Amino acid sequence: MSYDFETPVNRSNTGSEKWAAMYRSNPNVGKDVFPFSVADLDIKTAPEIVEGLQEYIATAVMGYDLPTDSYYKAVIDWMESRHSWEIKKEWIICTPGIIAAFYSAIRAYTEPGDGVLYMGPVYYPFMKSIKNTKRTLINNSLIRSGDRYEIDFDGLADKAKDPNTKLMLFSNPHNPVGRVWTRTELEKVVEICAANGVVILADEIHHDLIMPGHVFTPMASVSAAAADICITATAASKSFNIAGLRNSNVIISDPELHTAFKMDMEMTGIGGGTNVIGLKATEIAYTAAEDWLGEFKALIWHNHETLKDFLAKELPEVTVFDLEGTYLQWLDFSAFGLSHKQLEEITEQEAQVFLDEGYIFGDEGRGYERISLGAPTKTLMEAMERLVAVMQKYRKQG
């Protein structure tokens, strides 16, 4: 089946978060301007999901429903067929989104003041959830090596030794830098954390979006020690653009960690889980929309290569990082010598290009931008042409 990834969907005045943010920043944007910030897509939903939900809603009663056996089977089969990871029904906890899982894990496994590790630059709700729960931010910054990032294992070992450090929030594949961590890298992280009694929350929401030449490994699958300390947060939301349905699967095999997580959900009023539409959409995605996902991944890779070639020719000052996974492209604009606020002003007000500013991912991101590649190629490149036309004026002379 051939899917339509060429027709952009204009979501102005629909309640879209990123479109509303664009208009707040610049109310005078052109009518053909699309934002490329928040990680959802302005493309048509997979027809299998649309048609499946229409059929379901026609007869469904929207009551207090639990995940069905067919739902659990869909999740279990997906993890085994796509990621060679055998999981069990009793390990799965449904949550209303991944971020809710961050908070539950922090509250369940740490106390106020305890240290929580992360590796910046990283998905900003990591830092926000640590701050909001009054835990201590422990940043083990990634090491940049050319157009790729590596883990600072020496720094990680040193920080994990602190008895105050109790939890690590780990992004795999990494948002925003696009790394898909190798099995060897994951094993080293697990070895360090296990030796120091540090629990790991592995945010693997982008696990299906792996680019050619790379293999995704679920962190909890690398060893028995990993399974004992890992809480895996997954969802169909990024893979199939159904984030608004607020359904995620948290997978915890260790009985004590599982019980503690569920207890926090009960105590914070989310023990009832997610919603019936989110459950059904996930089941349909995993059982009927795999072909759509394959074509979507081909679009991401095509957009990455097209953007990289275009900027190498027209704006070589920008470093376009290798994309191993996710549909989020990390770009370095620091060669222009602009402050992060100047860069934001120029992109949004002059170029009318709306990205996620690098500084929201931590201080390491100042001078960087994150752009979503999940868009029709024509729409993406029109934005890049506007960006290049403006940024060429800010080139350093001499």
Image (cartoon, helix red, strand yellow):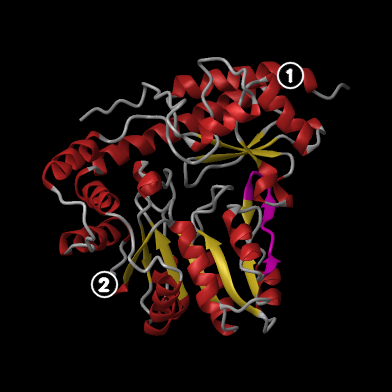
How many numbered marks appear? 2
In the image: residue 42, left or right of residue 307: left
Q: Position of residue 19 (x, y in %)?
A: 52, 30
Front residue of 204 and 71: 71
Q: Distance between the residues labelled 1 and 2?
A: 54 Å
Q: Residue at x 66, y 20 (%)?
A: 351
In the rendered image, the quadrant that contains the N terminus is top left
Amino acid marked by disc 1: Gln
Q: Position of residue 251 (x, y in %)?
A: 36, 68
Amino acid marked by disc 2: Lys
Front residue of 109 and 144: 109
User: Which numbered disc covers residue 367?
Assistant: none
Q: Is residue 16 magenta?
A: no
Judging from the image, what secondary structure is the residue with disc 1 in?
helix
Badge 1 is on which residue? Answer: 392
The answer to whether the residues at label 1 and label 2 have Cβ atoms under 8 Å apart is: no
Closer mark to the observer between disc 1 and disc 2: 2
Range covered by the magenta-colored residues: 136-148
User: Which numbered disc covers residue 88?
Assistant: 2
Judging from the image, what secondary structure is the residue with disc 2 in?
loop
Classified by dominant secondary structure, the portion drawn in magenta counts as strand
Q: Where is residue 227 in the image (x, y as percent from the top left)?
A: 41, 76
Q: Residue at x 38, y 65 (%)?
A: 250
Q: Earlier in the sequence, mark 1 or mark 2?
A: 2
In the image: residue 348, left or right of residue 41: right
In the rendered image, the quadrant that contains the C terminus is top right
Q: Which residue is drawn at 28% across and 37% down?
A: 292
Residue 266 visible in the shown view:
yes
Q: Is residue 139 magenta?
A: yes
Residue 118 visible in the shown view:
no
* Crowding at mark 1 (Cα within 10 Å: few <14, some 14-19, many 20+): few
